[in-house]
Image (cartoon, helix red, strand yellow):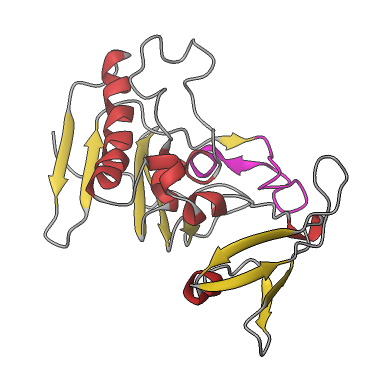
Amino acid sequence: MIYLSVVYKGIDFLDQLINVEIHMTKDEVKNMSCCSSFFTSKGVFELAREYTGKNIKVLEGLEPVRLRPGMYIGNTGSRGLHHLIWEVIDNSMDEHLAGVCDQISITLNENGSISIEDNGSGIPVDLHENTKDYPVADYPRGIVTERIIFTVLHAGGKFDGDTYKYSGGLHGVGASVVNALSSKLSVEIYRGGKVFLDEYQNGGQPVTPLDNGALVPIKTTRKKRY
């Protein structure tokens, strides 16, 4: 055990200078990555720590999900993976509870991915009003609603109490968190007699170009499944 004299250059809640002495091993000290430190020839460790506004980070978009996934899905193991899958399945179940869906298909693909499809209403593809993530300067006409759902935290149709009278998904984290924690996610929508496709990679980064904020239909014939 190495005796260390730790000097914290700051004040406590009583506005008094803090001078704390602790016992730590050299390896424990090295793990204190938040601090600037050095050893003297006598083995004395001096610690200088500043805590100011520059230490406060503001995470935008889906960045907080990617940085701290456990806060949103519990853990990054198999239970976390199942949580993500159930988030999408819950959306299909809510369509069924709303009386607009009677078929849900779940496919485990050979490449390790999973496909979930239902014959419900279809995710809205009309233009949504601007948000801070999609400002008027970049999207003067608004942004396609589907992209709001998959890239903006806490966006959904279950908060007004009218769209879904019954919902199994209100306890969840939403499609945007699923997108943020996926290496690749494809959203295929059949709505109004047209098929739309929006694709994301590397944790929710959109790769499908928009036309003045809108998704462009890729075809008019839906693949036959049901």
In this picture, is 27 found above or below 85? below
Nearer the observer, 6 or 60 = 6
Is residue 147 located in the magenta-colored stretch of the structure?
A: yes
Using the image, determine if residue 148 lies above or below residue 7: above
Query: Image quarter for residue 32?
Result: bottom right
Magenta highlight: main SS? loop
Query: How far across and how far down the image is residue 171, in percent?
Result: 40, 24
Q: Is residue 160 magenta?
A: no
Residue 111 vs 148, above or below: the answer is below
Query: Which residues lie in the magenta part?
Result: 129-148
Quarter-wise, where is residue 202 in the image?
bottom left
On screen, residue 186 versus residue 141, left or right, reads left
Does 9 appear above or below 225? below
Q: Which residue: 67% across, 81% down? A: 38
Which is more toward the observer, 200 or 214? 200
**Most foreground residue, 39 or 52:** 39
Q: Is residue 222 visible?
A: no
- Where is residue 10 drawn, in percent x and y? 82, 57
- Tell me which residue sits at (48%, 55%) in the image: 66
Residue extending furthest toward the right: 15
> In the rendered view, does 66 fall on the left or right side of 117?
right
Q: How many marks?
A: 0
Q: Quadrant of residue 118?
A: top left
| Residue 185 percent coordinates (x, y) | 35, 54
